[in-house]
Amino acid sequence: MSLQTPLKVFVTRGPMNESEHLVDAVVMNSDKKILTSFGDIYSPIYPRSAIKMLQALLVIESGAYEAQKLDARHLALASSSHYADPVHTELVHEWLAQYNLNEDNLRCGVQSPSRDSVRDSLLLANLKPNRGHNNCSGKHSGLISVCVHKGYDIKNYDDYNHPLQKDMIKTLSEVYEYDIGHAPYGIDGCGIPTIATPVFNLALGHVNLFKQTNGKLILDAVAKYPDLISGQNNFPTEITRATNGRVFAKVGAEGIYCALSPEDNIYIALKARDGGSRASQFATAALLKQFGCIRESEELLLQKFLHPKIKNWEGLTVGEIKL
């Protein structure tokens, strides 16, 4: 199959294009028909954190969600790459405490909070960041809940050969319609295996997410608690808030994004080839707008994402990001 031209995201300064990002992207509908695509959407890439809503399916499918009386907050947090605001870390602590566990049982590593204000508050309290501040601690809490429910050893739940990870491979292969059981894998920043999957199948996974009851539970949870999926002033949170829970987006490291608007029958997955997050986020916002997922009144709330400006240290606009 011949490859199409990738989507191009330009960063301007003055009258010139200063930088250029190449993006592989696909937009499909619920019938799995490709509405448009750019570049290579069939070669495997590492999906990183962009598939967390798919990974959260395991919390429900395992039986942990019902047996442990979890609620929408837990599903939203399990799907998140959060900012380690108190609303995130307090829920992580509460979640683990119900198993008589704490942040030390997480395998995601220590990470500083994303916001200066939260980091400063820790310093003022003479505290250090812990594993609960890792932006993947919600996903890891969900994985621990599965281990507890199924009687798996939690010590090495992040290991590729752990039964939890085998369960995850089965769940993801089903929604992707793509067998990842023998696909190349690497270790994500949070320690969990990230398994190579084409951009096309990432979009397909989100189509299939919405087609099942468990997936709708996850989307309803994110719609109810948009702050938990990411954090205030960050795109995945603000796109869901601005659209009143109609549109969802999930970022992954190294330029990955997935987005969906079931009401508008649009499903998007993409990868910036150079790993540039400014390109992947803008391309996602632009495609959502192009395919009618962002209304005129909502666009006003999303200006900084749809029309991002390049500013200097004086705060002067000196360029923009555009397709």
Image: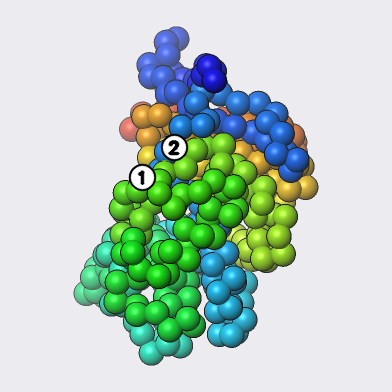
Across and down, in percent, residue 94 comes to: 45, 82
Which residue position is annotated with label 2?
44
Q: In which quarter of the image is residue 210?
A: bottom right
Q: In which quarter of the image is residue 277?
A: top left
| Image-based side of 225 in relation to 210, left or right | left
Please, what is the three-letter code of the amino acid marked with disc 2? Pro
Front residue (pair 183, 22):
183
Please, what is the three-letter code of the amino acid marked with disc 1? Pro
Residue at the far front: name it. Answer: 182
Across and down, in percent, residue 20 comes to: 41, 19
Which residue position is annotated with label 1?
184
Q: Earlier in the sequence, mark 2 or mark 1?
A: 2
User: Badge 2: how crowded within 10 Å, few (<14), some, or many (20+)?
Assistant: some
Seen at 59% across and 72% down, the residue is 60
The residues bearing labels 2 and 1 have C-alpha atoms spaced at a distance of 9 Å
Seen at 59% across and 32% down, the residue is 26
Residue at the far right: name it. Answer: 263
User: Badge 1: how crowded within 10 Å, few (<14), some, or many (20+)?
Assistant: some
- Which of the image's four quarters has the C terminus? top right
Callout 2–callout 1 Cβ contact below 8 Å: yes
Front residue (pair 127, 57):
57
Across and down, in percent, residue 160 comes to: 34, 61
Establish if 273 lies above or below 80. Answer: above
Give the SS element for disc 2.
strand
